[in-house]
Amino acid sequence: MDTSASVGFFVLMTIVKVVLVILILLTTIAYLTWLERKLVARIQSRWGPYLVGPHGLLQPVADGLKFLFKEDIVPLEVDRVVYWLAPFMAFTLAFLSIAVIPFGASYKFHGYEVFQLTDLNVGLLFVFAVTSLGVYGIALAGWSSNSKYPLFGGLRSSAQMISYEVSLSLAVIGVLMLSGTFSLRGIVDQQAAMWQSGGVLRFLPHWNLFLQPLGFICYFMAAIAETNRVPFDLPEGETELVGGFHTEYSSFKFALFFMSEYANMVTVSCLATLLFFGGWLGPAFGPGWFRLILPVFWFCLKVFCFLFFYIWVRGTLPRFRYDQLMAFGWKFLLPLALLNVLVTGLIIGWVG
Amino acid sequence: MAILFYIAAALAIIAGLSVILQRTPVYSALSLIVVLCALAVMYLLLGAPFIAVIQVIVYAGAIMVLFVMVIMLLNARRESATDRSRLAHFLGVPLLIALLVELLFVVWRQFPVASTHPAAILEGDPVSIGRLLFQTYVLPFEVTSILILVAMLGAVVLAKERVKGKG
């Protein structure tokens, strides 16, 4: 099918894309930590990091160096294989789901898609599969540490994650019914038109947010719980469980957990923009080459808004107690997501 | 394409052997997860991407998580070999090999290598699977879900502690 030259070109192109995307993602994660510290500080009427570099902008660099050079303490009775496997597994899986996220409009360079690593026709399910496997990183980290607090943290976190995965998947079914495809690029393409009904609504884009408001709310709450963020971060809350599942991890392995949590945040925010906010769609203007870059900019802007909201919620809300958390997931969010599926199905069947 | 199949198959076999040969239960569970992921790759190669991803989500991502959680809660440590019976110790592996050779022989006779089976009679996309599940096979589908519900209820009832003096 392919000559060896085109296979070589495909491999080269893919490697270039992968390296670029991973570098951008790593930088995003590093500066997301900076943003979080600054925003939470401002919410709490203080400054946040401002000594290292202007406005503390070199703080992530300092943190990274700190993590590399810190002493690596390994407790005595840990299960060696799993103790080392868990953070690498969490990190790898967190970065794996970026492979199917489209950043910009479809532009093919010599036949290969530029703004997406790969367009799977089951792209959305792939992200869910990777999220499901991500539970193992945390559960195994908690178990292998051979200590009470990490074990509880790991168990609580894995139970929480699998509970909210159900609501997450159900909340998305409404979007899937509307778009008819699992491919993420297809879901965004389906939102491309402007609102058809005319009148004042004519200026609104045809985002799934307006068609699926309940779905979006369920999705975002389930996503915050899925990424173990406040208000659902009991498994790693300092005041409850010391450090939770990453208590016994130091320096580089802890950095891997830290980065995987932020990478999960980024992934979930990317999914939220793709599914409900029209991904890279936005007003297009300017010359030809500018029109290529502009969708990427809109995408990044929307993802940034979600990350801002994540950090805002972190600075504002208190933590759920664990039984409250599980009750919320199973008794409120799951029926709400099911109701959304039901209502969406009924309306689609009625309107046709 | 064929090399991907051989890699996935080899991985599945090695991980499968690891499931039964490991001393620590958690390692067995992890090896089972590797087996399931290798099977998902093989489903992909057969042209069923939906089934492959659902396998990972449901089996490797939900069911095995519960397995791992139970193993973690039981705090099952490294097992030691129990050498109870010398007869079983010496006859075990040869008899197993004999059984496997017989099975292989029967399978070989049944499906000779020369005959080629059509690769995919059915489509693998979600629409076709949805049609099969909800139109052709809707009764087994619903009965299976009721069966799972009954099993869950049974498990809850069996595990529930008897509170003395109350109902």
Image (cartoon, coloured by chain):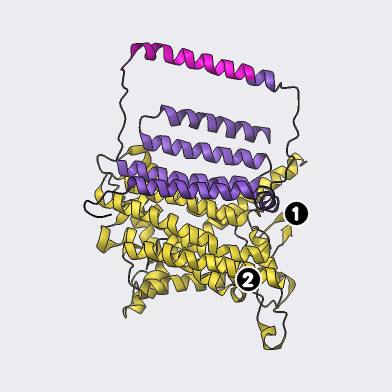
Chain colours: A yellow, B purple
Q: Residues within 10 Å of mark 1 (few under 14, many from 20)?
A: few
Residue A38 or residue B86, whichever sits in front: B86
Verify whether residue B101 appears in magenta.
Answer: yes
What is the chain identity of the residue bearing mark 1? A
Q: Residues within 10 Å of mark 2 (few under 14, many from 20)?
A: many
Q: Which residue is mark 1?
A: A111
Question: What amino acid type is highlighted by mark number 1?
Answer: Gly
Residue A301 image-quadrant placement: bottom right
In the image, taking residue A94 as reference, residue A103 lies left or right, namely right
Task: Kindly give the residue lying farthest to the bottom in the view shown.
Answer: A200
What label sits on residue A205 in the rendered view?
none
The residue located at (41%, 46%) in the rendering is B154
Verify whether residue B88 appears in magenta.
Answer: yes
Q: Quadrant of the C terminus of chain A?
A: bottom right
The residue located at (52%, 66%) in the rendering is A337
Residue A298 or residue A186, whichever sits in front: A186
Secondary structure at badge 1 equals loop
- In this picture, which residue range is highlighted in magenta? B78-106
Instruction: Say yes or no: labels 1 and 2 on the same chain.
Output: yes
Main secondary structure along the magenta-highlighted residues: helix
The answer to whether residue A81 is above or below residue A118 is above
Q: Which residue is mark 2?
A: A278
The answer to whether residue B40 is above or below residue A24 is above
Residue A5: x %, y % from top left:
74, 42
Q: Which is more N-terminal, label 2 or label 1?
A: 1
Residue A118: x %, y % from top left:
64, 53
Q: CA distance from mark 1 to mark 2?
A: 25 Å
